[in-house]
Image (tube, grey):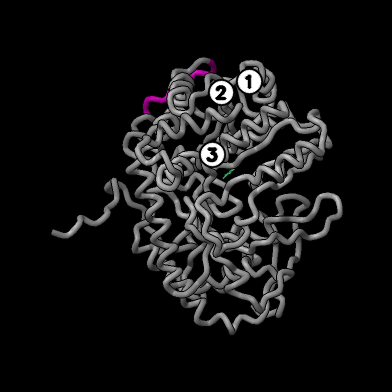
């Protein structure tokens, strides 16, 4: 008897054609895009691993929910469907819909953060950091040191270092720390999970200092999956039980539903406390829309509610996260260093180790992203110095410890044959890595969140 192999927990009903291109075409396109892969047209890309945000495939049930959407301005049934799903799965009584995750941050932070405030957390996501710094407040990264060594094996590299956190809480007065943001899973440190133990300890520390804890929850279900697999005492618990316990250690949450709720657009803020919810309502009405739709169509709220149920099913998560690990293993087999253990939504290639000859001032991860695109039409994304941006005060470039090329896998979209293709394309670049002698330089950039629109050129002047 042979043990039955793993197979995906769904089959495919609708397909979308993708097109290959020639290297010559790609050379022209990427130069015209000023070496910023965000500027490419999607049909210039064969396999798109730019992001897993809003790029997932909805299920037949989600599509059927679209038809049932209630487009009433106020009090739509779709709002209540979403409310019930949030109460049932997350456990929060109060919520505000928003059009996406950063909108949730904008609304919440408008009601909580003022100039000069301190917001500790675990490697804040770029939009989170942007929204904090835009308010002239300061995010402080308290992630454990192990997270910054791509080869160190630690089951929960998203964890907060409690000593670092407590020293921040001691150093600043309570009035200057409006909240702690815990990102689950931690996107910026490689899609790495936070353990239940850590969530619990952060919460009890915060409560001792009288400070709110909000989860940046885009990938909360993937975090729960890792807790089930890696943390003692959780193997026999269901994903939903784990999710409920996770959120019992938070006062609220911001959510980009484009991730674990498997919709193309949407978000929300969840609250335990009625007063905080009320305080944020005004900003929701100003920036997003009335509190029962907040920038979302009724049909989208329906699909989101259904997505919350599907996104917290074990078999779905198992299919997804095994595919990420499959890509990670294929790449590792070629001798390339990636962040380990493999994360929940992406494989992060260590660009400093891949291209040690490229100085950090020449953006090694962006250089690698461009080379991978040229090789196979695969679009990844830089998670390095471009993303880290300039210091808002000194305007100096900030160089993070890690220069990563993120290969982000959309949910339920690509097959493992696509993953093989990506791994081989990267391996071909690896073979030729010594020929890559120099990197990129900036021609123009925006004052904040520059990576989306930055224009680059090759340092050596060649096309
Ligand atoms: C995507 C994301 C956000 C922002 O959400 P958008 O829907 O893209 O606006 C915030 N935090 C984390 C951790 C994310 O992954």
Q: Residues within 10 Å of mark 1 (few under 14, many from 20)?
A: many
Residue 238 percent location from the top left of the image: 37, 35
Examine the residues drawn in magenta and state their main secondary structure: loop
| Pick the front one: 204 or 130 | 204
Q: Is-magenta flag for residue 48?
A: no
Q: Is residue 285 visible?
A: yes
Residue drawn at (55%, 61%), measured in percent from left and top?
Answer: 152
Decide which of tag 2 and tag 3 comes sooner along the chain: 2
Could you say which disc has been placed on residue 197 in the image?
3
Between 352 and 98, the one nearer to me in the picture? 352
**Residue 64 x %, y %:** 34, 31
Nearer to us of marks 2 and 3 is 3
Distance, label 3 to label 1, CA atoms, is 27 Å
Label 3 near ligand 1 (CB < 8 Å)? no
In the figure, is residue 459 to the left or right of 249? right
> Magenta span covers which residues?
67-74
Residue displayed at 75% across by 50% down:
448
Find residue 95 and name its label.
Answer: 2
Mark 2 neighbour density, 10 Å: few (under 14) some (14–19) many (20 or more) = many
Calculate the distance from the C-alpha at mark 2 to the C-alpha at mark 3.
Answer: 26 Å
Determine the secondary structure under disc 2.
strand
According to the picture, the residue beneath numbered tag 1 turns out to be 277
> Which circle's residue, 2 or 1, is located before the other in the chain?
2
Q: On residue 363, which mark appears?
A: none
Ligand 1 shown in quarter: top right
The reply to whether dot 2 and dot 1 touch (C-beta < 8 Å) is: yes
């Amino acid at each position: 008897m042979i043990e039955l192999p793993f197979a995906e927990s769904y089959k495919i009903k609708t397909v979308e054609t993708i097109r290959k291109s020639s290297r010559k075409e790609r050379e022209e396109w990427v130069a015209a895009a000023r070496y910023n892969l965000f500027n490419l047209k999607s049909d210039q890309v064969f396999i798109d691993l730019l992001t897993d945000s809003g790029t997932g495939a909805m299920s037949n049930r989600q599509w059927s929910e679209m038809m049932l959407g209630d487009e009433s301005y106020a009090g739509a049934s779709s709002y209540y469907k979403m409310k019930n799903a949030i109460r049932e799965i997350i456990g929060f009584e109060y919520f505000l819909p928003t059009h996406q995750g950063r909108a949730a941050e904008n609304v919440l932070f408008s009601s909580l953060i003022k100039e000069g405030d301190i917001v500790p957390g675990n490697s804040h996501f770029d939009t989170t950091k942007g929204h904090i710094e835009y308010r002239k407040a300061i995010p402080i990264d308290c992630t454990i040191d192990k997270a910054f060594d791509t080869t160190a094996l630690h089951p929960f590299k998203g964890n907060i270092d409690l000593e670092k956190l407590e020293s921040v809480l001691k150093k600043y007065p309570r009035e200057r720390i409006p909240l702690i943001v815990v990102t689950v899973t931690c996107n910026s440190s490689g899609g790495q999970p936070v353990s239940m133990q850590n969530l619990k300890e952060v919460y009890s520390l915060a409560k001792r200092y009288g400070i709110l804890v909000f989860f940046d929850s885009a990938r909360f279900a993937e975090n729960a999956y890792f807790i089930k697999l890696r943390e003692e005492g959780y193997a026999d618990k269901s994903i939903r039980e784990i999710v409920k316990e996770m959120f019992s250690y938070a006062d609220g949450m911001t959510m980009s539903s484009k991730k674990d709720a498997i919709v193309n657009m949407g978000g929300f803020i969840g609250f335990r406390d009625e007063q905080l919810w009320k305080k944020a309502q005004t900003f929701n009405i100003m920036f997003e829309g009335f509190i029962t739709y907040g920038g979302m169509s009724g049909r989208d709220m329906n699909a989101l509610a259904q997505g919350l149920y599907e996104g917290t099913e074990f078999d779905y998560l198992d299919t997804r996260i095994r595919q990420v690990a499959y890509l990670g293993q294929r790449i590792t087999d070629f001798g390339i260093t990636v962040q380990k253990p493999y994360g929940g939504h992406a494989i992060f290639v260590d660009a400093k180790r891949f291209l040690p000859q490229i100085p950090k001032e020449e953006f090694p991860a962006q250089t690698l992203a461009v080379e991978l695109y040229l090789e196979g039409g695969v679009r990844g994304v830089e998670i390095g110095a471009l993303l880290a941006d300039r210091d808002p005060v000194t305007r100096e470039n900030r160089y993070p410890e890690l220069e990563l090329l993120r290969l982000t896998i959309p949910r339920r979209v690509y097959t493992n044959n696509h993953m093989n293709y990506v791994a081989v394309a990267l391996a071909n670049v690896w073979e030729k890595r010594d020929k890559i002698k120099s990197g990129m330089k900036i021609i123009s950039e925006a004052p904040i969140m520059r990576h989306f629109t930055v224009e680059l050129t090759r340092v050596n002047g060649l096309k």
